[in-house]
Image (cartoon, helix red, strand yellow):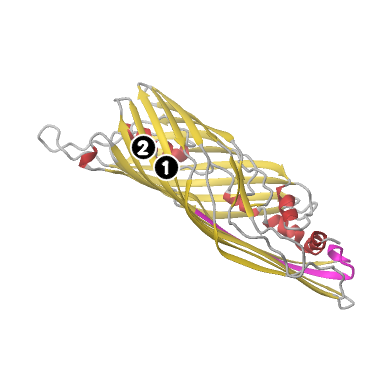
Amino acid sequence: MTPIQSKARVGAVTGAVLGLLLSVPALAQDAHYTTRQFGNRAWLLGGAFVGNPNDISAVYYNPGALALLGAPELELTGSVYEYTRLKVKDGQGQGKDLSDSNVDVLPSLIAGSLRFGFLGKSRMAYSLLTRQGFSYSLQSRGTRPGTDLAGVQGLDSLSTDVRLDQTVSEFWTGLSWAYPVTEHLGLGLTPFVATRHHELRFQTQAQGSGAAGQQLLATLGRDLEFDHVRVLLKLGASYQHGPWAVGLTVTTPSLSLWGRGSVGFERAVLSQGVDTNAPAPVFDFQEDLPAHFRNSWSAALGVSRSFGESTAVYASLEGYARVSSITLVDAGPIVPRGTTEVLNGDYAFALKPLLNGALGVEQALGDRVRVYLSGHTDFSALDQTHATNALVGGWDLYHLASGIHFVLGRSRFTLGGDLAWGSKQTARFAETLQQLGLSAPMRTQDVHFFQATLLVGASFSFKDSKATSGKGAVEEVPKADSP
């Protein structure tokens, strides 16, 4: 029996539970680009306004449009309440589904204009956005009676304890500059510094016994942790004339500034009166290792058209280039003492090229209220890797959003929601288990994903306090669509 086969035999004790919990990182949508939007109206329009964002969220969607804004402002995408539900059909075996749900409260975007006398016609703005953010800890325990459980003769009782902890946080900090080349054309750029922290810890324990005194104790643990800092650049141009607006943005690949991480691998099987041909124990921890992460080229094209004073339609397409497979942390090979077995403790990361689209409609109800309806795609960029893939979200998602944007005093508020859903038959869970040397209860599983997001946000406009006719300026009451 080979080491992999022996691991599969013992690992079958916990294979079903492992298969379930390895699906949970899909809650983060780690292989998707447009699950979240950045800005109040951006959520309601599905990020469709690359041509003319018409508010401070231009710092992310099109820095060139920042040059054509009418007044400086501060925007807070205050609270984003996100409910997520994931269902894996037959995740625990034939006829036994897995479902998991959680609720997160996420900050999304804080952005504001910067005003300096030396800027002249130029505009500057700052931004801080949460590109990704989630944290959870899951544990599953169970006991199974039977005969020859997990294929081990004599075992009639098995208990399993499986735990998965994962934390991912990624923040982008940007400083935008834009210049109005003409009355209708603006050019701009936003350099972003992106900081990412990622932790993944997996622990499983299986304990079995038999009537004749057989005893089995098997443990397996893996962990990954890294911090990474990189820089990237968004370039944008926006042309706005009459009822039409057209925009183009390009996002450059990131340049790594710094990254360090650590990995760990533990495995031990103890038995009495059981013939398991157990693999050699492993206790390997590697720290202060180089860490890597990067994003791809992307380009977006957007167009919008207004119809009178009441209706506007927005559309955009964004394409993303491939990210070839990279190893997140440079771990050395693991060779258990006294064996020739070589274990790979690496986690890999790779993204395939894809194209996403968005379409949104904005309708005015008087001067102070606007309503929105939009839809956008959120296709998965998950690509195959030779080493254990750190990404799991391999299903395409579709979003539908709606809400209102209204004026109170000098401030504007947003209340709305976004629904996302998708499903796919996938062998990703079984493949991940095989890379761990474990067996899965089913070769493929049907994954069903649903997410509901509630948005509560606000933005504040600041009129120029300088007098234009020798007298104090008269404050103008903003409209719902004014910047």
Count of number-bearing discs? 2
Q: Secondary structure at mark 2?
A: loop
* Location of residue 291 with respect to 45 vertically, above or below: below
Q: Amino acid at mark 1?
A: Gly
Residue 414 rendering spot, x and y as whole percentages = 41, 42
Near mark 1 (Cα within 10 A), the count class, few <14, some 14-19 or many ≥20, is many
Q: State the residue at coordinates (29%, 25%).
A: 183
Residue 262 rendering spot, x and y as whole percentages = 57, 62
Q: Secondary structure at mark 1?
A: loop
Q: Is residue 194 magenta?
A: no
Which of the labelled discs sits on residue 39, or is there none?
1
Viewed as shown, does residue 388 lie left or right of 480? right
Disc 1 + disc 2, Cβ < 8 Å: yes
Rounded to the nearest angstrom, the CA distance separating label 1 from label 2 is 9 Å
Front residue of this view, candidates 330 and 364:
330
Quarter of the N terminus within the rendering? bottom right
Near mark 2 (Cα within 10 A), the count class, few <14, some 14-19 or many ≥20, is many
Q: What secondary structure characterizes most of the magenta part?
A: strand
Residue 58 rendering spot, x and y as whole percentages = 39, 37
Instruction: Residue at the far bottom: name it.
Output: 213
Q: State the residue at coordinates (13%, 38%).
A: 472
